[in-house]
Image (cartoon, rainbow, N blue to C red):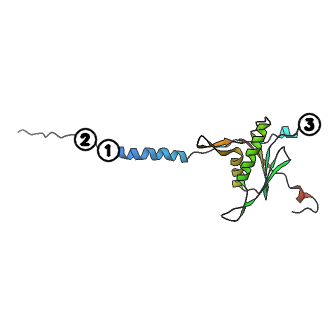
Amino acid sequence: MRTRRTRQEEADLDITSFMNLMIILVPVLLMSMVFSHITVLDLKLPDIASSAAPNDNNQLNEGLELVIEADEMVINYPVGVPLKRLPKIEDRETGELVYDFGTLSLALQEIKRLLKEKGKDKKDILILSQANTDYQTIVRAMDTVRSFKAVVAASVVNAELFPAVSLGDAPVNEASDRPGGSK
């Protein structure tokens, strides 16, 4: 008896559907990586030792400050000397009073330009805020003082303003501390 063995053909692997899946999946995964990027901002604490030491040269403190108060932002240069006051403005959509970060950016650009004309390349700024200042306001202020949008060769880029940001507590308003002063 002879048994005939039939020869079985090996099936070809059809990986077309798998390749289609990879062609779609790889770009989607690569694009989603951009959205998971985390930005880290280096902050510096004010140097207590240098501010507590007496100034032997009798020079003005050349520090730049942004003080965030309840009803306005104040740019001080040198430290403690108000240079520009930016009162809150009314938001067009909600009608609430909000800080004017657009004017703040323009004012800081002008200060940067004036400092460069005097030969000073200042990169640091101290942001002082009240204890009850909203977190989002502080973050927005930090973003505003670090850079601004500028057009260079038909491209929008972030131009540097004052990237070395320090944080601190704003001084208490003297008018509310004096006897007979308003609170």
Label 2 secondary element: loop
Report the residue marked by disc 2: 12
Question: Residue visible at 91% across and 36% down?
Answer: 58
Residue 55 percent coordinates (x, y): 90, 36
Question: Residue visible at 84% across and 37% down?
Answer: 50
Q: Amino acid at mark 3?
A: Asn
Residue 141 percent coordinates (x, y): 72, 50
Q: Nearer the viewer, residue 118 or 35?
A: 118
Q: Nearer the viewer, mark 2 or mark 3?
A: 3
Residue 123 percent coordinates (x, y): 74, 39
Picture quadrant of residue 47: top right
Residue 157 percent coordinates (x, y): 62, 43
Q: Amino acid at mark 1?
A: Thr
Q: Nearer the viewer, residue 156 or 169?
A: 156
Within 10 angstroms of label 3, few (less than 14), some, or many (20 or more) residues?
few
Report the residue marked by disc 3: 58
Within 10 angstroms of label 1, few (less than 14), some, or many (20 or more) residues?
few
Report the residue marked by disc 1: 16
Q: CA distance from mark 2 to mark 3?
A: 88 Å
Q: Residue furthest right?
A: 179
Q: Nearer the viewer, residue 23 or 109?
A: 109
Label 1 secondary element: helix
Return the disc, 2 or 3, that comes first in the chain's sequence.
2
Is residue 93 rendered to the left or right of residue 17?
A: right
Is residue 103 rendered to the left or right of residue 182?
A: left
